[in-house]
Image (cartoon, rainbow, N blue to C red):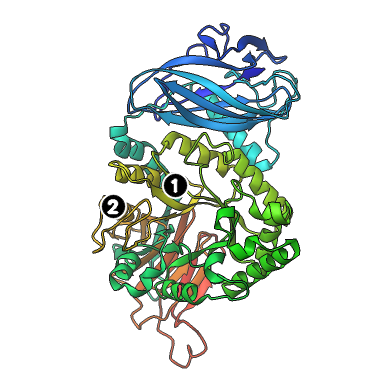
Amino acid sequence: MLEMGMWKMSELGSPACIIRNPEFSRGIPGWSIFRNSSIGERTSGTGNKYLVSYSGSASKQFLLEKEKLYAFSVWLQTSDGNADIIASFQVGGEVIHAGAIEAKSGCWSMLKGGLSVDVTGPAVLFFEHCVRDLGGQHLLAAIYSRRMEASSNPDHPKGKFCFQEKAERKLAERMLCRFQILITLQFLSLSTSRIFLLLYLLFSVAHYGVARTRLVRVKAMDANGALLRNAAISIKQQRPGFPFGTAIPKSILTNTLYQNWFTSRFTVTTFENEMKWYSTETSQGNENYYTADAMLAFAEQHRIAVRGHNIFWDDPKYQMGWVTSLPYSQLKNAAGKRLYSIVSRYKGRLIAWDVNNENLHFSFFEQRLGSGFSGDAFWRAGKLDPGTMLFLNDYNTLEQPGDTKATPDKYLAKLKEMQDYTKYSGKIAIGVESHFNQPNIPFMRAALDKLAGAGVPIWLTEVDVFRSPNQAQYLEAILREGFSHPAVQGIVMWAGWHAEGCDRMCLTDNNFKNLPSGDVVDKLISEWRSETVVGRTDNNGIFEARLFHGEHEITVLQSSAGHLSVNQEGAVLSSEGMMQDCKKMMIELFGQGSVELPVSATRPRSTADSANSKADCAIRRSPLPNRATAVCD
């Protein structure tokens, strides 16, 4: 039996509604049976009306327009057991998957999804499901009406949702708040030809301002503490704060042109294969880290952060023959040795570890060594390298709405499994590989929203787009969407250069001249950084500017200033030596809100005074939040 409860489809920046009677207050006209099902209407004890279907799916026809984006949300449950449910639209002879979820009995699960179509015409919405463990019972799914309270459930007066963690419950509450504000069952409608203009203006820019920038106030004072009014100030960004980069192969070590192109653009990377087990121990007991060591030294030389990819890979086809031939006890010892060897070798030098790659789709080590293998690997890696983020890393959570192995809910369940195993002792994060063909931007946004409910960092770890005439356009849409989402904390593309040609996506030709996708990358790098800001302090000696996160050099042209770095709380991270006239200050911005930096300068310290200090200026922490003072005394 399939019940359908709360619907929401929204137009970005507009409340346009295409669903009539979304609350089922006038019954269920317009809904039809699909594939030999039967449908009906029910009313809960709290007055909520919903639609049910038996032994199949209800369906509804819409008129969808070409080059528009559509997004929706729906609450689902089963009558008994669990079932993977896929929301699909039949458009002509094509079936487009728009989202998937594992529905459960006794509680409501929220499916968020979206789609775009290439042809204007009728489209039929229906729900496909893979029933398992239903004990012969019918499937039950529900679309709540707009009047649903957070505690209501059609069959249970108090009811509950399938959110076990506080963060996920908060996400549900936030979504319910959105439902109350926006008209139920609206369509997000946006011309594809305007995606880089309107989507950017209405969504991306708004989120850039909230998630990627910070308000900075500089208070200028002279050596005696007097305010400097009308002082000329220049602020220039030296380095972006948002980690953005691409994977690299070992060929970069011997190609100067490649090195120059790469290091002038990016702040983070992943080694394509050089850290993987099959690269560092091709035969049992013969480890060789020479190439990985050299690549890491190159990255460190250029201040480029590195993600450790990977400790294990759960896909059986990437296991070496000597690994697959080992019996249980020897394989367990070999895996333990592998983890200790690579993690201890690079402890403290990486920003992340992909611990057991793609363990949503595959389970080589779990099948051979037991279901707790991944959890144990996370726990051991966290103990060996406690300061480094530990990632799940898998594909199709953003790319393919119909992949039921990697739905946002399945990902969150795996994340919770790792957190429970490690007792939350490690810094566990979400890596979504992002190997796209044609991106479904509404679904991508919906999936990121769902994942964000876990409250842990999210990275797009291997972004690429299959070769097509629209590759650059698709790449731009994906990167903008990722950068705009406040839960995304970094993006790495999978676009390493190879003389023989790239796998799926190239950014340059063999002379390192940008291809169209490379031009997109350069355009976004330029856009995602602050332009040089020039102005003057006001009557209170204050100059204010909103800046992208990152390192900025502030030059006070008519006064003296210090040179320091602050984090999002305003705490001093470091300071550097200053010349006698003390003209510049360096700030490093992350987080939201604002930071005020009162800076004063007196006489420079003597060489003897600073002999035991890394800086010629003392850094005094203000008792007020978001403030720090650099004083040359």
Q: Position of residue 613 (x, y in %)?
A: 50, 85
Q: Residue at x 48, y 12 (%)?
A: 20
Q: Which residue is mark 2?
A: 523
Q: State the CA–CA distance, disc 2 to disc 1.
A: 21 Å
In the rendered picture of this protein, how many numbered marks are placed on residues? 2
Q: Depth check: 81 or 194 in front?
A: 81
Q: Is residue 383 above or below residue 153?
A: below
**Sooner in the amino-acid sequence: mark 2 or mark 1:** 1
Q: Is residue 217 above or below residue 158?
A: below
Q: Residue at x 46, y 64 (%)?
A: 271
Label 2 packing within 10 angstroms: few (<14), some (14-19), many (20+) = few
Q: Depth check: 109 or 324 in front?
A: 324
Q: Position of residue 541 (x, y in %)?
A: 36, 62
Judging from the image, what secondary structure is the residue with disc 2 in? helix
- Judge whether residue 424 can be spotted in this image: no
Q: Position of residue 364 (x, y in %)?
A: 64, 53
Judging from the image, what secondary structure is the residue with disc 1 in? strand
- Judge whether residue 311 can be spotted in this image: yes
Q: Which residue is mark 1?
A: 435
- Look at label 1 and name its amino acid: His
Q: Position of residue 276 (x, y in %)?
A: 53, 64
541 relative to 432 in the view: left or right: left
- Look at label 2 and name its amino acid: Lys
Q: Quadrant of residue 382?
A: bottom right
